[in-house]
Image (cartoon, helix red, strand yellow):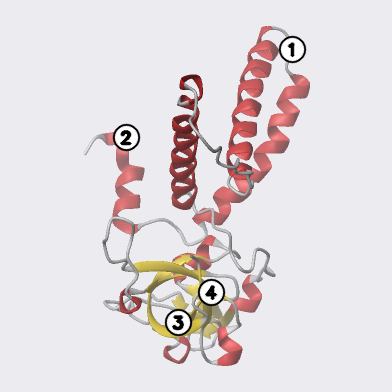
Amino acid sequence: MPQNEYIEEAIKKHGRRFDHEERKRKKEARMVHKKSQIAQKVHGFKAKLLNKRRHSEKIQMKKTIKAHQERNNKHKEEPLQEGAVPTYLLDRETKSNAKVLSNMIKQKRKEKAGKWSVPLPKVKGLDEAEVFKVARTGSRKQKAWKRVVTKATFVGEGFTRKPPKYERFIRPMALRYKKAHVTHPELGATFCLPILGVKKNPSSPMYTQLGVMTKGTIIEVNVSELGLVTQSGKVVWGKYAQITNNPENDGCINAVLLV
């Protein structure tokens, strides 16, 4: 191993700290103020370079926002003309088809980027004090580095607990769930489907990593029982659903399938 790659090696062996994503997010949020201070102080040739770079960033940002907004736009369809179409108008149909195709590609890209139109677009954020309970350890109960998760969680099939001495986040067996009641919005029917994983918890990336399931969380469920197929004829295995209830209060998970 090269001498300067010890950090990468440590990440591969031991992983990152649980709050890595949160710290990264906060650092990025602070960068705005830092950039503002630099922009106010800088002058001369460096100011020209900074403004040029900022200009290109703004253009890119506007393009991204426009691409995301275009998905929800409703375009009016022109009525079909009766009779023969002149030769100079024959190309127009192919152009509109090309536009539809590009929109399909954009939509797939957005889905990959995690942009869904969800039933609950805004949910209340959860504080760590609400999700975790401090578990005191040691002979005199003076150590307070362990946390007990008080919300519903999901752990995979091959999950093995760490030795109790080294386990920081304790996920109680009573709050672990393997199945969810998923409602198909178009069919209007509810199915009890196995959970495959937690895709995103809007409150915190750490909750996503721990598999904490709260109201508004996006989970992946096994829909092979429903017999859904893609346009190419392949059977759909997993689909995303959003949790619509508070599982720790109701004792079950209710979700709506994202079609």
Q: Please tell me whether mark 1 or mark 4 is closer to you in this view.
A: 4
Q: Is residue 204 above or below residue 109?
A: below
Decide which of 26, 119 is in the foreground and name it. 119
Left or right, 129 with respect to 98, comes to: right
Q: Earlier in the sequence, mark 2 or mark 3?
A: 2
Q: Is label 4 in a helix, a strand or a loop?
A: loop
Question: Which amino acid type corresponds to the residue marked 1 in the rendered image?
Answer: His
Disc 1 and disc 2 in contact, CB within 8 angstroms: no
Q: Residue furthest right?
A: 40
The answer for how far apart the CA atoms under marks 1 and 3 are is: 54 Å
Q: Residue furthest left?
A: 1
Q: Is label 3 in a helix, a strand or a loop?
A: loop
Q: Please tell me whether mark 4 or mark 3 is closer to you in this view.
A: 4
The answer for how far apart the CA atoms under marks 1 and 4 are is: 57 Å
Residue under label 2, please give it: 4
Q: Residues within 10 Å of mark 4 (few under 14, many from 20)?
A: few
Residue under label 4, please give it: 185
